Amino acid sequence: MRKNLNVIAAYSIMMVLILMVGIFQSWNIALSIFNLCLISAVMTMGANIQWGYAGLINFGIMGYTALGGLAAVLISVDPVQEAWRAGGFDILMSLWLIVVMVLVIRFILKRFEKSKIRTYSIAAIIISGILLIRFSAEPGIEAIEAVDPAKTGFLGGFGLPIIFSWIVGALFAGGLAFIVGKVALGLRADYLAIATLLISEIVIAIIKHEDWLTRGVKNVIGLKRPAPYEVNLQTTDWFIKLVEKFNAGKLSVIENLADRQAALNQLVIEGSSVFVKLCYSGLFLVVVIILLILTQKALYSPWGRMMRAIRDNEEAANAMGKNVVKQHLLIFILGSAIVGIAGAMLVTQDGLFTPGSYRPMRYTFLIWVMVIVGGSGNNFGAILGGFVVWFLWIEAAPISLFLINFFTAGIPETNALKAHLIESVPYFRFLLMGLGLLFIMRYRPKGILPEKIEIK
Amino acid sequence: MDFVNAIILLLNYIFVPALTYGSQLALGAIFVTLIYGILRFANFATGDMMSFGTMATILFTWYFQSLGVSLGVLPTALLAIPFGIIFMIFYMLLIDKFVFKYYRNQKSPPVQFAMVSIGVMFVTQAVVRIIIGPGDRRFFDGEKFIIKAREFKEMTGLNEGLALKSTQVITIFVTIVLVSLLFWFLNRTKTGKSMKAYSDNEDLALLSGIDPKKIVLVTWVIAGILATIGGALYGLDKSFKPFTYFNNMLPIFAAAIVGGIGNPFGAFLGGYVIAFSEILLTYAYKKFFMYVLPESMEPNSLVQLLSTDYKFAVSFSILVIVLIYRPSGIFKGKVL
């Protein structure tokens, strides 16, 4: 109990902060912060596995998040039959071509010794393959994108419940991580950071511009939900009764029957959105707890000890017969897969997929701030980092507005400087994040909850 | 005649824009590579530092414009750049003193430096947005074109026009002057040589009596000059928007690494490699082939290798390929 005191204290403070938002602002805001905190926590756990356990730096979080989101679309949207008829064959042909290309390259790699001719012939195959695919798929893609472009214009998905996408998102992200890991993991740390960052930008570019697959910047809206809809809840008897029961005291004060009915309606509308958010919180909490148990088990298993040994001294671990390259690849895939889950969760919660919104500031660097602030190598720290940083990210604007008003209380409203400052309140969150990161790195380089290894 | 038309077409749509864009990237890439070679870290705040310098330049431009000072046909910003540079250098030295110096003294690993530079990136981004806002700013004034497409057509009687914007000429001219000065400084002066020595082997350089404080100071001064001029030229040519500058960091990194990180000349060429490949691969060659080929062989499609949406992706793919096959860059930089 004693040694976990700081963990418990940190989490209690965090919960009190969120409860305070609920009491002073609204429960709706508090719950949406809480839900995104949970999603951020999942992402942070993914990054923490790579950075904290193995010392691998992955600046491609954005790409894996977007792939998770793509999985949510591809799983839950109903297939667009017309589009499949129009261009499905061409797309399948291109897919087939890609498979053939990969097989041929594999064959060449296996069969021939490393030489200049081999490298050039592989390059030639790739370039001619891309050209071939581009020209053969062109008519199909155009046909698909022409199918009712205002509503569909893409192939659609499989029409399955969206929850499945959380697993598929992990698979997608893991698959990408396999390719990236094979290619880039040999690089030194800061080059790996740049390479992963750029690869994730390529992924985003593809998702943004391949309209036949993702609708691109036209966005996919109205994804199916795993939780009930507010509109349905508001007309359901048991829910209205529940709200009535919760607010019995408040309602009984109102004498007039019509007024009471109006107040109840208002409460039902508010309650329904809180209820939906609570459903999501429940689902997300389950994911976070399962992941936490798994990652904790892994951390204290022989495998976890091996990973730490590799992180702390690669050569020594190699000399002891541990396959460093293979383990790095494995952990890179695992971490990215967790980020993929988070990406699918995010799209599930929003109910829409907007490729244009994936920006490195929000989905890569902010997550890294979470990892560093929370404490790398410590799963509880990672989750806490997700909570603290997301909370500050959202609440930075109100806090800085309050501070500006406090310090400039004597200055009249019409003052140009004051007006300018109040106008630029949204950007103080960047300042807060940057300063927070710099201070933590300087004065508490291991994060709020540092890594603690007990050998049992 | 058709052949001349085709050449002019390529000059107008590929060569001149790529040369301009490449110059802007090259300045940024030399900035990245100097910081990497001498201070030994990948500076993720590159794009935002450039936007800070540009912001200072814009503020001075506005100030001069309000005073009624102008350079006639040339943009007023040229007058404001030196003041912007002073501000930029001051800001960089401030950051170095309060942030990077500590880690340099600790001899922290490069990864930690990179993380710290992300903190600096956030702060700089906030500062720029709070001061000037996130919106699009144009601060170009003076004569816009040196040759207009229409005038060129009338002059030569060709079908294709060659438009030459004054910002393009200024960019290329300033880049050539600046880069030659820089290489003269690095290769011919004592300070420049000691910087190179410090970059090659820190311990040996220290043993031979090189003052590390001076090296760091000079590096930031050069970095400030490069960042401000590179940023301001980009802003003059296109427009100033903090978010674009952040995004530009990525092709700049690509240019620096493709050229061999730590090697200023490689970075300079890397900028052009990236710019030309981006534009060559995403240009639609239909019109070009219409001029060159006989009528019967004219293409129906756009003859575009990749759609322009993938402009950035091209440079990143080049970078990834270079990283895999030749991690020290095309022009041999530091070995990984």
Image (tube, rainbow, N blue to C red):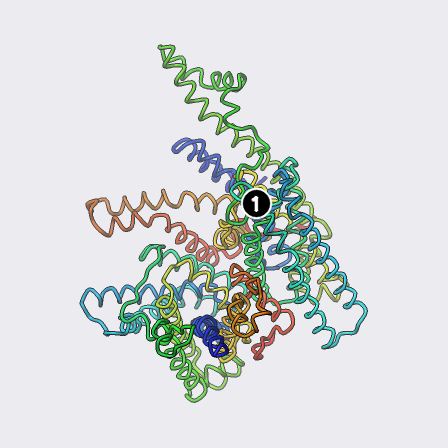
Question: Is B207 on the left or on the right of A96, as rendered?
Answer: left
Can you name the residue that lies furthest to the front here? B296
Q: Position of residue B165 (x, y in %)?
A: 36, 72
Q: Residue at x 57, y 73 (%)?
A: B294
From the viewer's perspective, is residue B55 above or below residue A374? below
Count of numbered circles on the image:
1
Q: Chain of mark 1?
A: A
Q: Position of residue B189 (x, y in %)?
A: 41, 88
Q: Quadrant of the N terminus of chain A?
A: top right
Question: Is B107 on the left or on the right of B191, as rendered?
Answer: right
Can you name the residue that lies furthest to the bottom here? B188
Question: Is B152 on the left or on the right of A345, as rendered?
Answer: left
User: Residue A441 or B301: which is nearer the viewer?
Assistant: B301
Q: Position of residue A140 (x, y in %)?
A: 63, 51
Q: Residue at x 70, y 54 (%)?
A: A95
Q: Position of residue A74 (x, y in %)?
A: 63, 43
Can you name the residue that lies furthest to the right here? A111
Q: Which residue is mark 1?
A: A153
The kind of residue tagged 1 is Gly
> In which quadrant of the rendered view does residue A228 lie?
top right
From the viewer's perspective, is residue B17 above or below residue A345? below
Q: Residue at x 40, y 68 (%)?
A: B96
User: Residue A310 or B177: which is nearer the viewer?
Assistant: B177
Secondary element at tag 1: loop
